[in-house]
Image: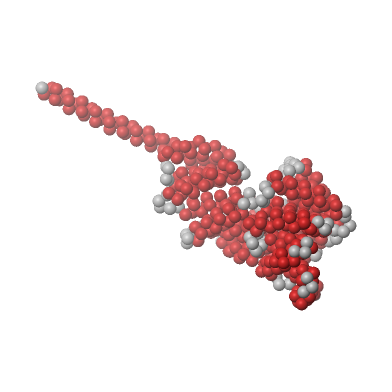
Amino acid sequence: MRRWMLLGILVITASWGGRILFQRHQASQKAKAEAVWSATYQHATQAFYQGNYATAEKIFVNILPDAEKRYPEDRRLAELLSMLGTSYSMDHRYELAEPALKRALQVYEMISPSDPLGSERAELNLAGIYRDREDYPAAERYYSEALSLSEKTPGGPMYERGDALLNLGFIRMVQGRYQEAEQLLDRAVKALASDSMPWAQRDLASAIYRLGGVYTMENRYREAKQQYLKALEIQERVSGPNSREVGFTLQGLGQAYRAEGNTSKATELLNRAQEIARRSAAPGDDSRAGISVDLGEAAQNAGKYAEAESLYKRAVNVYEKTVGPESPDLARALLYLGCLYRDEGQFDITKAGPLLERALAIREKALGPDHPSTASALSELSLLDFYEHKFGEAERFAERALPIEEKAYGLESLEVSTTLNRLGLAERDLKKFAQAETSLKRALTIREKNLPRNHQWIALSLDNLASVYLARGEYGKAAPLIKRAQAIRSHSAG
């Protein structure tokens, strides 16, 4: 009997011992698996920070399913998804980047304690996708959320805050909201100036460069040149004197000189920018075509219309050979050439229509019917039809463009004011005087809010609104508007 009892005890002891050994084995295997996963993750992370995104992508994709199982509400899964999405974004694979970054944000929201910096970086990278797609409302939303997270974390890194401010300033600039753009870009400069890392210095130069663009649009050319020169000094030091960034800033500096009326200096700078683009161009690179468009605009502003025509045509030919017949870049060159034929009396205005219509068709197909660039082509066609006394068509094109621009740029943007002017003129000549007055008053109000008080566009709006009152015989309303427009022009001449 005792033997059986002893045997039973031995069996139970052996069973417990086996279970303990099994559990230890399981724990050992789990620890080994986690060690292998961590080592693989570190390898992918290293590739990511070295800029080897293709390698990082492959590794992250392979270990992602295991990470979803092991760490469903853990910082490691969130960081993996964020780096994977960023890698896709850097390779312009936005269709894969977007869901990865959105999933990263979902995981960051589940983490306890929270990781505001991780969320902020995912927000910034997601916003960058929408910015590159020119989906500015979505980009603005995520940049604003990233900025809010940064401001709620005192003592956090300033680079991310500067990045959000820089891009929000850029969006305001695109929208024509220059005063807001200036404020945001000023804040970006202050945030980025304290960071000496090369990538922060590059963004600092970009913020200063954008400020130059804002000042150019506001007719503050001396200030614009100062900003471009500051950006140029940083870019030449950080990226080299023949870098693409230097080329872009020279292009902006040339545009400021051109707007100021110094065509020779503008042409010198634009030629230097074109030479940098030529040296840095890879096979099939079309960057010189964009500078040709700017050189064409400089020539057009200088009254060298034949030279402008040649440069625009050169850009069209380059784009057709490099990016093909359906590229939005080609559409830009076609638009400039069409507007030259429309606006300058020495050319046959009937050449403008096919070019502008082709530009519109390209943008509708490549970018969609509701894209801001499509609206720009519609607005230019509206002015062409107005010049050709096709007032009904002019009205229809402007009416199509207006809601797109209002959504993309904001109700009080300068792009909206331009299309309202064109709509109001068409309505005036269709004898829709009440509608014309409303459109032209709104255009004037927008310009008075966004531009210096003696800007030529304000004078133009005053004249256009006065023309409606003259057409209705309301000379008392027209006279003060005309007088004010004349005063602005006299101030500019002085």
In this image, 494 relative to 133: left or right? right
Residue 91 position by quadrant: top right
Residue at x-position 60% and y-position 42%: 93
| Image side of residue 265 versus residue 193, left or right | right
Residue drawn 75% across the image and 62% down it: 427
Q: Is residue 469 above or below residue 329?
A: below
Identify the residue shown where x is 65% and y is 64%: 412
- State the residue in front, 98 or 17: 98
Image location of residue 210, percent across then percent down: 66, 60
Count of numbered badges drawn on the protein: 0
- Report x, y in % for residue 206: 64, 57
Residue pushed farthest right? Answer: 346
The quarter in which the C terminus is drawn is bottom right
**Looking at this view, is 284 or 32 the one in front?**
284
Task: Name the quadrant of the N terminus.
Answer: top left
Left or right of 388: which side holds 108? left
Q: Is residue 187 above or below residue 102?
A: below
Rendered position, 185 above or below 289: below
Tell me where residue 263 sits by quadrant. bottom right
From the viewer's perspective, is 200 left or right of 224? Answer: left
**Image x and y of residue 147, in percent:** 53, 58
Q: Residue at x 31, y 33 (%)?
A: 23
